């Protein structure tokens, strides 16, 4: 049976337990404003009873542990919600910025430029020889071209900025991973002694995990998930095993850290790809597998699929790259269709810019917008009368100069044929003009020795050949990056002509240009798809998509913000510090301490009484 000294020890254990409880409660109150602090509770158990003569008497209380009130399931939901909210935050901000690059108001923007451009063609059609009308047309075309170029450059600048930020973000991710590995090492060292719990370090690791989840999606596995119903029914992490994977690749394995590698050394565009690297130095490209968080948003906006040999090393996908591609398709069609029409304006000679094209390369393989079909070469005399016409056919295998699989362009153009069906071999197209394709890629139609004041025009029947290769250009360039007005016309607008046949009163080219705005055209995408729209309709669809994407991203942000707040509230209700609750506990433990002290005082009085009897 317990003696007085045993009871004294029982009271002393109560004092110690209450003291530990007060200290823990004080720690909770002190960290009430600490967002990443998890409240703690003291776990008590009765000390082993002492038995004597068939009677068992308790020997006090023992502090078995100080545990975190933490629910791993709710925490994992918070981690995912943080990743989603961070993704939408970055996407919404970026897409709102892109939307500002298309200020299509009544008095500004590319849509207004298009209206002005076709208005000037209409004015020229009314007075085809007026120098002032030609000047106004060239200026409006130059404004349209400059605004298209500027918009593309600004969008590309945002894409470049995201690519640069990606490097900083991956460096931050690696720093977080290294810190998590170091925390794991400290946890293992502290908890190697049975009974020790590195609660504050686990809080620190949770903070790092949440910060990391805002950067990208991660998968976390902890070796031992338990529930201590004596304190709290939630599932909490325990043990020292820890695994954190990114895109299926090991990133943190306990105290071992495997950094991500970001590299652009083999890409002329300087756009980065991201790799997981194993210990032997082997790299695995995980750019397409990364998702969620700020980095996932960056990659979805910038683009993930990168091949240094395709598209100049720029991404082949991505929201922003999609806008650039559509703007390129828009500009390409304007250039091609404008030059298709302008090729109808008879000239003394024609020459294309130097083409990135070999003599034996299929035209349809080299140009995504050249179609099978035909175009006509038309020769006019000095009075504007048509004197010869030759039809040139383009098939799948047609090249500029190789006749292996199909008659080439040069062969068809230079072939001695009776184009006029008059049995006269000296008045056909090949008698007046000779086609040449040089090694540097320059294609030309030059007058022959028989040519005396004759001019030539190209009338396309749907092949896009003259516009694609740039014969008799009014607009130069190939896409939105370099669309411009022919420099000769910018220097001297009077050189441009609105006629087809070279006679006063012929306004065929100007009238066709005016009609172009109403025609349904083919807009060729880099992925091989073709959209059929008017010029204004296609541009309107592009701006609508930009605005819709920005609006959808903003809506998604609002939804995920609300979801994140709900989950965070649930998490804080479990792990957060409630001051009222802690103050109530503090009073309870203070009362327990006072009661335990009363036991000590009582035993002291009893001992004094006992000593007094002995005296």
Image (tube, rainbow, N blue to C red):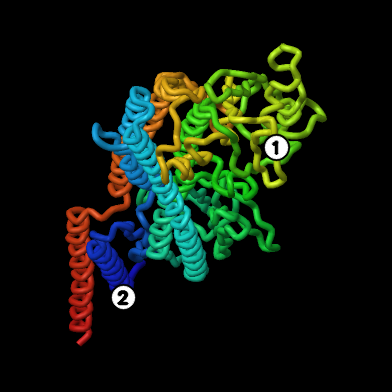
**Along the line of sight, the residue nearer the viewer: 148 or 60:** 148
Report helix, strand or loop for mark 2: helix
| Mark 1 nearby-residue class (10 Å; few <14, some 14–19, many ≥20) | some
**Looking at the image, which residue sits at the far right?**
404
**Along the line of sight, the residue nearer the viewer: 186 or 25:** 186
Q: Position of residue 246 (x, y in %)?
A: 54, 51
**Along the line of sight, the residue nearer the viewer: 443 or 193:** 443
- Comparing marks 2 and 1, which lies closer to the viewer? 1
Q: Is residue 597 left or right of residue 189?
A: left
Q: Position of residue 423 (x, y in %)?
A: 76, 13
Q: Position of residue 359 (x, y in %)?
A: 74, 38
Name the residue that disc number 2 marks.
Answer: 5
Please tell me which residue is depicted at 57% across the width and 26% down the height of the picture: 457
Q: Is residue 38 left or right of residue 350?
A: left
Query: Residue 611 appears in which quarter of the rendering?
Result: bottom left
Q: Position of residue 150 (x, y in %)?
A: 39, 46
Name the residue that disc number 1 marks.
Answer: 436
Determine the CA span between mark 2 and mark 1: 117 Å
Q: Earlier in the sequence, mark 2 or mark 1?
A: 2
Q: Check the picture and name the quadrant holding the C terminus.
A: bottom left
Please tell me which residue is depicted at 33% across the width and 34% down the height of the picture: 113
Please tell me which residue is depicted at 45% across the width and 60% down the height of the picture: 168
Q: Is residue 615 left or right of residue 8?
A: left
Residue 75 drawn above or below residue 609: above
Residue 167 drawn above or below residue 129: below
Query: Residue 559 appears in which quarter of the rendering?
Result: top left
**Along the line of sight, the residue nearer the viewer: 302 or 127:** 127
Residue 360 drawn above or below residue 207: above
Report helix, strand or loop for mark 1: strand
Query: Residue 361 appears in which quarter of the rendering?
Result: top right
């Amino acid at each position: 049976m317990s003696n007085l000294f045993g009871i004294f020890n029982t009271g002393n254990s109560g004092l110690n337990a209450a003291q530990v409880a007060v200290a823990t409660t004080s720690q909770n109150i002190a960290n009430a404003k600490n967002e990443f602090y998890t409240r703690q509770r003291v776990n008590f158990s009765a000390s082993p009873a002492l038995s004597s003569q068939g009677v068992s008497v308790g020997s006090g209380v023992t502090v078995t542990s100080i545990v975190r009130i933490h629910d791993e399931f709710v925490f994992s939901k918070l981690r995912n919600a943080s990743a989603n909210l961070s993704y939408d935050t970055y996407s919404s901000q970026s897409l709102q910025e892109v939307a500002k690059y298309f200020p299509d108001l009544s008095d500004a923007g590319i849509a207004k430029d298009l209206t002005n451009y076709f208005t000037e063609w209409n004015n020229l059609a009314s007075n085809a020889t007026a120098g002032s009308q030609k000047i106004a047309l060239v200026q409006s075309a130059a404004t349209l071209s400059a605004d298209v170029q500027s918009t593309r450059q600004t969008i590309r600048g945002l894409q470049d900025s995201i690519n640069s930020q990606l490097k900083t973000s991956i460096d931050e991710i690696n720093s977080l991973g290294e810190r998590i590995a170091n925390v794991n090492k400290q946890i293992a060292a502290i908890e190697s002694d049975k009974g020790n719990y590195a609660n504050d370090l686990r809080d620190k690791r949770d903070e790092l995990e949440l910060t990391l989840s805002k950067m990208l999606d991660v998968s976390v596995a902890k070796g031992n998930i338990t529930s201590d119903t004596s304190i709290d029914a939630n599932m909490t992490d325990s043990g020292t095993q820890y695994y954190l994977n990114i895109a299926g690749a090991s990133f943190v394995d306990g105290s071992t850290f495997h950094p991500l590698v970001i590299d652009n050394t083999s890409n002329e565009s300087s756009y980065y790809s991201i790799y997981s690297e194993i210990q032997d130095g082997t790299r695995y490209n995980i750019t397409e597998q990364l998702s969620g968080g700020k980095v996932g948003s960056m990659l979805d906006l910038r683009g993930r699929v990168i091949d240094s040999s395709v598209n100049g090393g720029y991404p082949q996908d991505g929201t922003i790259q999609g806008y650039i591609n559509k703007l390129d398709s828009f500009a390409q069609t304007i250039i091609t269709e404008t030059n298709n029409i302008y090729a109808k304006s008879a000239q003394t000679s024609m020459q294309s810019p130097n083409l990135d094209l070999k003599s034996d390369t299929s035209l349809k393989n080299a140009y995504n917008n050249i179609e099978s079909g035909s175009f006509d070469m038309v020769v006019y005399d000095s009075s504007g009368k048509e004197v010869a016409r030759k039809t040139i056919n383009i098939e799948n295998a047609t090249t500029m100069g190789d006749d292996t699989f199909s008659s080439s362009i040069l062969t068809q153009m230079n072939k001695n044929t009776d184009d006029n069906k008059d049995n006269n071999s000296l008045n056909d197209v090949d008698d007046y003009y000779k086609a040449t394709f040089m090694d540097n890629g320059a294609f030309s139609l030059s007058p022959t020795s028989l040519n005396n004041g004759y001019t030539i025009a190209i009338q396309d029947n749907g092949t896009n050949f003259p516009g694609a290769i740039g014969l008799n250009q009014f607009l130069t360039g190939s896409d939105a990056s370099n669309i411009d007005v022919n420099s000769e016309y910018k220097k001297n607008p009077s050189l441009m002509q609105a006629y087809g046949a070279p006679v006063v009163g012929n306004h065929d080219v100007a009238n066709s240009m005016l009609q172009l705005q109403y025609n349904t055209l083919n807009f060729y995408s880099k992925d091989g798809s073709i959209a059929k729209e008017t010029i204004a309709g296609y541009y309107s669809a592009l701006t609508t998509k930009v605005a819709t994407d920005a609006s959808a991203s903003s809506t998604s942000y609002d939804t995920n913000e609300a979801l994140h707040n709900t989950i965070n509230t649930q998490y804080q209700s479990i792990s957060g510090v409630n001051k009222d609750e802690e103050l109530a506990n503090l009073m309870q433990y203070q009362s327990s301490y006072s009661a335990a002290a009363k036991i000590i005082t009582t035993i002291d009085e009893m001992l004094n009484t006992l000593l007094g009897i002995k005296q």
